[in-house]
Amino acid sequence: MGITLPLRLDHVVIAVAEWERSNAFYRDILGAEIVDLEKGRFAYRLRDGQQLNVHGPESTPHPRAVEPVRPGNSDLCFVWDGPLEEAAAHLGAHGVDVELGPVERQGATGVGVSLYFRDPDGSLLELISYDASR
C-alpha cells in the first residue's frame, strides 16, 4: 500500500482550436464558469473547485509540457450526480451525439455507468454516474 500524501488534483490542461465555440460548449454542456484569464486565455471552472485550464489559439503559456496538449488530444471523465438517463437527455437537448454508452466502467470511486461523447475539437469526454438508481 502506498503512502498517503496531502495532495489532490487542482486542474488539468486541455487545448481548443476556437475560443468562442469551445467556451459555449463547455459552458452549456458541462456547466462551466468561463474564467477570463490574462492575455486572451480562458479557464473552465467546474463545481467543487475543479478547473480545466485551456490552451487555445495563439496562446503559448510557460512552462508547459515537452509535447503540449493539442486540440482534440484530451480524454476526460466527469462525474454525473444522478441517473445517466438524465445525462443522455441533457446531451440530446444540446444536439450532442453519444458515441458509446451506457456502458459499465470502473471509475475512481468504484463501478459506474458511462456515456462517451466528443467536444467540438474531438477530445473524448465521459460522464460517469455512480447513482444507485441507474
Image: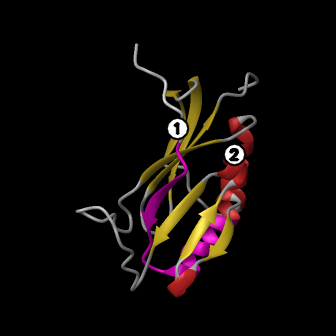
Q: Nearer the viewer, residue 80 or 84?
A: 80
Is there any visible trace of residue 26 in the rendered image? yes
Residue at the location (59% across, 30% down)? 113
Query: On residue 87, which mark appears?
Result: 2
Q: Taking 121 as reference, is 20 left or right? A: right
Magenta span: 9-27
Quadrant position of the C terminus in the picture? top right
Q: Taking 66 as reference, is 8 left or right? A: right
Residue picked out by circle 1: 7
Sequence-wise first label, 2 or 1: 1
Closer to us: mark 2 or mark 1? Answer: 1
Q: Specify whether residue 55 is painted magenta.
A: no
Q: Position of residue 48 (x, y in %)?
A: 71, 47
Q: Nearer the viewer, residue 134 or 13?
A: 13
Q: Residue furthest front?
A: 6
Q: Amino acid at mark 2?
A: Ala
Residue at the location (40% across, 19% down)? 2
Q: Amino acid at mark 1?
A: Leu
Q: Specify whether residue 19 is painted magenta.
A: yes
